Amino acid sequence: MQNIKNSLFLSCLKATGFIEKKQAIGLTFKEELQLKIHLSMCKVCSSYEHQSRAIEDGIVKNYKKKNKLENDENLDQFEKEIIEKIKNL
Amino acid sequence: MDILKDSFETDLKEQLTVWVGLYHKDLLRWAEYKVNDKENAKDLVQETFLAAYNGIKRYKGESSPRTWLFRILNHKIVDFYRGKSKTPSSLGEDAAFSVTESMFDQHQNWEVNGFESNWENGNLFDNPVFVNVFGNCMEDLPESWSKILSDKYFFEKKTEQVCQENGITPTNYWQILHRAKLLMKKCIENMWSKS
């Protein structure tokens, strides 16, 4: 009985890991089922799923906040300068 | 012997020149994001390549050249801020892992802390204080975790690329994303508990 219980029920640490795994590389059929069962019973993990998305959006926003690449012409010059410095070492 | 030495130096320079061509854009984008200043960013990237030339014998090929160059750049960025006495303080990997473990009890279920409902407020990112806290929490992430996040979300690389680039398996990959998000959650909830 213990074995059946362990194979069906995830801990919250495992379940939240599966939430990330699902998003990153996908879950197996069994994992998907385990996660569904867990989320149907655990409010805190359901709430984590929402938080995880919010954190992800925040990370993307934070990275985009001040990211403006110079035009390529300037960068060609920059590249040449570095290569020149290396040659003269 | 001198001829041999010269040809070795020439090979090194050629190798490095190739890397400059391949990676200067990514390195500059990252440096600009981190120091928020174009000229300083350019200086740091240039120093990175010069340091790479001097230290190339220490490069063992365990990670990709790009990852190695980013490691050098990140050290330069830390030095840059140290000079300005505004050191970003990232956690070590082990310490960070322990922090995320502490969010769960002995059965690996949540230690509920009462801040769960704060997340339900849909407009968190409209609050400049929250945005600032969020940015600081990102700085706390261990460097190796932050590297995975930036490859995924800043450079928008595919999973296979991120894994290859950083010498990790797909399992390492989602586990690091998991721990990084847990640490972000913990850091933000800490700020809430203090205010």
Image (cartoon, grey):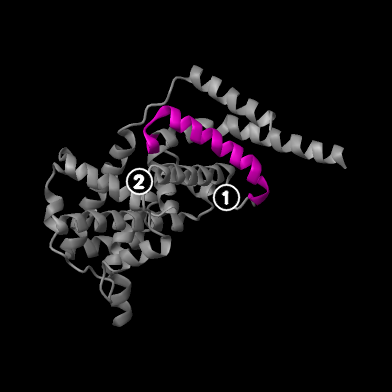
Out of B96 and B78, give the one closest to the viewer. B78
Main SS of residues in magenta: helix
The residue that mark 2 highlights is B86
B148 with respect to B18 (left or right):
left
Count of numbered marks:
2
Most extreme residue toward the top, as rendered?
Answer: A73
Q: Position of residue B34 (x, y in %)?
A: 39, 38
- Crowd around label 1: few <14 · some 14–19 · many ≥20 (10 Å): some
Q: Quadrant of the N terminus of chain A?
A: bottom left
Residue B159 image position (x, y, % from top left): 45, 46
Residue name at image x 45 percent, y 53 percent: B144
Residue lying furthest bottom in this view? A1
Residue beneath the point at 45% across and 40% down: B157
Q: Is residue B12 above or below residue B93?
A: above
- Mark 2 or mark 1, which has the lower sequence index? 1
Kind of residue indicated by mark 2:
Lys
Residue B44 belongs to magenta span? yes
A10 or B130, nearer to the observer = B130
Query: Which residues lie in the magenta part?
Result: B33-59
Residue B75: where, in percent of width, then height? 49, 47
Chain assignment, label 2:
B
Left or right: B123, with A80 as reference point: left
Residue B126 shows in the view: yes
Can residue A3 be found in the magenta stretch? no
Q: Do we see residue A14 in this rendering?
A: no
